[in-house]
C-alpha cells in the first residue's frame, strides 16, 4: 500500500498544450479525418481517461509490483490480481480503439489525444499499460502490410481489444543488432509459414488478459540474405483460427528490476503456424510503419513517470517540515518550515516541473507531426511533417525516458529516507522508469539514429526546417517586453545549433561523429526546450486574462527553464565545436 502516492491528471496542462500552445484545432480542421474534433471533445475524452487511470489503474500499481506475474507448470502466465478485471473495463469503455481508424472499428482520434491518454495510463501504472501499449503498432503494421485475409481476421479484434499483441524481435544473441536474428520460417504449400526459434524479453508474450495473443515475429526464410535485409515478419497467433493452441510456449518469465506486473517472456516457437506480413525479406520495413509511434509511446512512459514524480514530490515537500528556510512564510511560528521552501529542494522541483512541461509540448508537437504525416490531404505537408516527426522521435524517446528515470531519482531525494522505502511509491517509479531507456531501441541507438540518419542522412534538411520554426518563434516573442528573455535565449540556441550541426556535417570520420552523438542529442534537446519555453510563455500571456495567477506561475516556471537549465547546452556545443580528438582505447584509459 503506497502511503501518499496519488495522481492529479494534468488535464489543464494538456488542454493548454493542445489548444493554446500548439493550436491543434487548426491542424485538425485541415485534416478530413479529424475535422469534426474540437478541444472540448478532446478534453472530455481525457477527463474520462484520467478517471480510468487514477481510479482503476493507480490502486493496482503498488500491489502489482509486489505480486508480480506467475508462470505455472503448464506455461500459463498469471498477471497480478486485478489486472485482468481492469483490462476488461478498459475494453468495455472502448479505450483500445481510441486512435485506430474507423474502418476497423476505431474512434479515429489523433495521436495527440491518444498520447495524452497514454501519458496518464503510464503515470498510474506503467506495468499494466505495457499490455495494451502494443495494440496500436500491431494494428498499423497488419493494416499496412498484411494480406486482406489477415486484416479481416485480426485487425478488428485487436482494435476492440478482444485480443492483445506482442512484438517478438529480441533473441539471446540479437538485441540492438536485429541482423543477428536466427528464428526460422518455412513457407508451406498453402502459403502459411512454420516458425521455429527462441525469443527473449517478449513483453506480454503470454498472460491471462485475453483469450488470444497475436505475435508479430521477426524471422528468417531459408536462403535469406544475412543481416537485416534477410528478415521477414510473421503473424503467429497463440490460438489458431480452428481454435487449437499454436505450437508456441512461454518457457519462463524474467525476474526483473521494475514493471514487475508486466510479463516479460522467453518464448519458444516449435514450428508454430503463422502468415507473413509484408514481402519476404522486408520484415523490418513492415515494422518501420510503427516505429515512430511506438517510440512516441515509450517517450510518454518517461513523461508519465516524470509528471508523477514531480507532483508527488511537490505535495510531500509542502507537507514535510524540516529546519528553517532562509525566507520564512509570514507568521511562521513553528521551529521548522516546509522543505519546499529550501532553495535546494525548490531547484529540484522547479527543474522537474519546467522539464516536464516543456517535454509535454515537444511530445505534443511530435504527435501532431505524426498526425499530419498520416492524415493531411496535401502531399508536401505530409512529407514535411514526416521529416519533422522523424527528426524529433529519437530526441523525444531518449530524452523523455531519461527524464522519467532521472526525474524519479531527483524526486526521490525530496522524500529523503522515506523515498527509499517502498510505501512512498517513488522507489517503484524509479525502478519502473529505467527500462524505457533500454527497450524500443536503446537510447544510444536513438543517438546514432539522430546523427547518422536524421541529421547527416538528409544533410541537415529536416534540421533546417526545425530551425526555421524556432526562428519564427523568436520573431513572435521579440516585440513583447515580457517575452524578450525567451526570444533572446531561443535565438542564442538557434545560432549555437546552426554552428554545431554545420560542424557535425563536416565531419567525415564515423568514429568522430558517433563520439559526439550524445552531445548532439543533449544540445538539440535544449534547443527544443528553449522553443517550448518560448511558445508556452507566449501562450500563457494570451490566456492571462482568463486566469492571471495560473499564467504568471507558468511564466515563472518557463523563465526558470531559460535561466537555470538552458546554460547546460553550451557544454555540449563546446564539445561538438572543439573536439578534434579521438576517444582513447579503453585499455589505455584504465
Ligand atoms: C523488460 C523488457 C521488455 C522488453 N520487451 C521487448 C519486447 O516486447 N519485444 C522485443 O522484441 N524485445 C523486448 N525487449 C528487448 C529490448 O528491446 C532489448 O533489450 C534492447 O533492444 C537492447 O538489446 P540488448 O538487451 O541485447 O542489449 P545490447 O544490444 O547487447 O546492448 C548493450 C549495450 O550496448 C549498447 N550498444 C549496442 N550497440 C551499440 C552501438 N552500435 N553504439 C552504441 N552503443 C551500442 C546498447 O545501447 C546497450 O547500452 C525487452 C527488454 C526488457 C528488459
Image (spheres, rainbow, N blue to C red):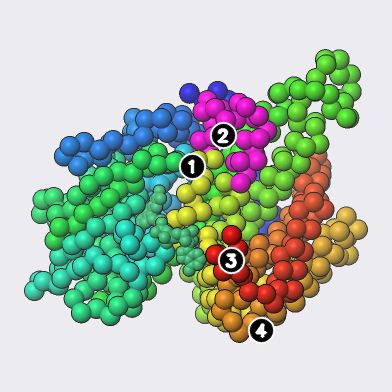
Relative to 256, is 121 on the left or the right? right
Which residue is label 4 attached to? Answer: 506
Q: Position of residue 393 (x, y in %)?
A: 55, 64
Q: Nearer the viewer, residue 230 or 558?
A: 230
Q: Could you tell me what secondary structure mostly forms the magenta stretch?
A: helix
Quick check: 73 left or right of 402? left
Q: Element at badge 3?
A: helix
Asked if the residue at tag 1 contacts the one at tag 2, i.e. Cβ–Cβ closer than 8 Å, the answer is no
Q: Please say whether residue 417 is one of the residues in the magenta stretch.
A: yes
**Residue 319 in view in this figure:** yes
| Residue 272's disc number | none
Q: Quadrant of residue 430?
A: top right
Of callouts 1 and 3, the N-terminal one: 1
Q: CB of mark 4 within 8 Å of CB of mark 1?
A: no
Q: Which residue is mark 1?
A: 432
Percent position of residue 34, x then y = 51, 61
Q: Which mark is in front, 2 or 3? A: 3
Give me the C-alpha separation between circle 2 and circle 1.
10 Å
Going from the N terminus, do you reach mark 2 or mark 4 first? 2
Q: Is residue 384 above or below residue 555?
A: below
Say if disc 2 is inside 8 Å of ligand 1. no
Residue at disc 1, secondary structure:
helix
Which residue is found at the position 75% from the left and 58% from the top? 568
Amino acid at each position: 500500500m503506497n502511503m501518499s502516492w496519488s495522481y492529479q491528471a494534468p488535464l489543464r496542462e494538456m488542454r493548454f498544450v493542445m489548444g493554446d500552445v500548439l493550436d491543434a484545432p487548426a491542424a485538425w480542421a485541415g485534416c478530413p479525418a479529424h475535422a469534426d474534433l474540437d478541444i472540448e471533445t478532446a478534453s472530455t475524452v481525457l477527463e474520462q481517461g484520467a478517471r480510468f487511470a487514477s481510479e482503476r489503474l493507480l490502486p493496482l500499481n503498488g500491489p502489482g509490483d509486489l505480486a508480480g506475474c506467475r508462470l505455472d507448470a503448464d506455461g500459463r502466465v498469471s498477471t497480478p490480481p486485478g489486472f485482468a478485471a481492469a483490462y476488461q473495463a478498459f475494453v468495455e469503455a472502448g479505450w483500445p480503439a481510441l486512435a485506430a481508424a474507423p474502418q476497423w472499428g476505431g474512434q479515429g482520434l489523433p495521436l495527440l489525444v491518444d498520447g495524452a491518454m497514454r501519458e496518464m495510463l503510464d503515470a498510474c501504472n506503467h506495468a499494466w499499460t505495457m499490455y495494451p501499449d502494443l495494440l496500436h503498432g500491431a494494428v498499423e503494421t497488419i493494416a499496412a502490410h498484411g494480406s486482406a485475409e489477415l486484416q479481416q481476421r485480426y485487425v478488428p479484434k485487436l482494435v476492440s481489444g478482444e485480443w492483445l499483441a506482442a512484438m517478438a524481435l529480441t533473441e539471446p544473441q540479437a538485441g540492438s543488432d536485429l541482423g543477428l536474428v536466427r528464428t526460422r520460417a518455412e513457407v508451406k504449400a498453402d502459403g502459411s509459414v512454420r516458425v521455429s526459434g527462441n525469443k527473449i524479453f517478449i513483453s506480454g508474450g503470454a498472460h491471462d488478459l485475453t483469450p488470444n495473443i497475436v505475435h508479430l515475429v521477426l524471422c528468417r526464410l531459408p536462403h535469406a540474405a544475412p543481416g537485416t535485409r534477410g528478415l521477414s515478419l510473421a503473424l503467429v497467433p497463440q490460438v489458431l483460427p480452428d481454435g487449437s493452441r499454436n505450437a508456441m510456449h512461454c518457457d519462463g518469465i524474467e525476474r526483473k528490476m521494475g514493471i514487475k506486473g508486466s510479463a516479460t517472456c522467453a518464448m519458444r516457437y516449435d514450428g508454430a503456424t503463422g502468415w507473413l506480413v509484408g514481402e519476404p525479406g522486408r520484415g523490418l520495413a513492415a515494422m518501420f510503419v510503427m516505429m515512430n509511434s511506438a517510440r512516441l509511446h515509450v517517450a510518454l512512459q518517461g513523461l508519465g513517470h516524470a509528471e508523477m514524480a514531480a507532483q508527488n514530490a511537490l505535495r510531500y515537500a509542502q507537507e514535510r517540515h524540516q529546519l528553517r528556510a532562509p525566507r520564512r512564510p509570514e507568521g511562521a511560528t513553528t521551529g521548522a518550515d516546509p522543505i519546499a521552501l529550501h532553495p535546494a529542494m525548490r531547484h529540484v522541483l522547479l527543474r522537474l516541473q519546467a522539464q516536464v512541461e516543456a517535454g509535454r509540448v515537444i511530445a505534443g508537437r511530435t504527435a501532431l507531426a505524426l498526425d499530419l504525416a498520416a492524415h493531411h490531404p496535401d502531399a508536401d505537408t505530409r512529407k514535411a511533417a514526416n521529416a519533422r516527426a522523424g527528426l524529433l522521435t529519437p530526441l523525444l524517446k531518449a530524452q523523455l525516458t531519461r527524464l522519467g528515470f532521472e526525474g524519479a531519482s531527483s524526486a526521490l531525494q525530496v522524500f529523503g529516507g522515506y523515498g527509499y522505502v517502498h510505501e512512498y511509491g517513488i522507489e517503484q517509479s524509479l525502478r519502473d522508469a529505467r527500462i524505457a531507456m533500454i527497450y524500443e531501441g536503446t537510447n544510444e541507438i536513438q543517438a546514432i539514429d539522430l546523427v547518422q540518419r536524421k541529421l547527416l542522412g538528409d544533410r541537415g534538411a529536416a534540421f533546417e526546417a526545425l530551425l526555421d520554426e524556432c526562428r519564427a518563434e523568436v520573431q513572435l516573442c521579440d516585440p513583447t517586453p515580457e517575452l524578450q528573455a525567451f526570444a533572446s535565449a531561443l535565438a542564442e540556441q538557434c545560432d549555437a545549433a546552426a554552428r554545431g550541426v554545420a560542424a557535425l556535417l563536416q565531419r567525415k570520420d564515423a568514429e568522430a561523429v558517433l563520439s559526439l552523438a550524445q552531445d548532439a542529442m543533449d544540445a538539440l534537446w535544449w534547443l527544443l526546450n528553449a522553443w517550448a519555453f518560448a511558445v508556452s510563455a507566449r501562450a500563457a500571456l494570451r490566456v492571462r486574462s482568463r486566469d492571471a495567477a495560473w499564467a504568471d506561475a507558468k511564466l515563472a516556471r518557463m523563465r526558470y527553464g531559460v535561466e537555470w537549465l538552458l546554460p547546460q547546452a553550451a557544454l555540449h556545443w563546446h564539445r561538438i565545436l572543439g573536439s578534434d580528438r579521438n576517444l582513447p582505447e579503453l585499455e589505455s584509459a584504465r
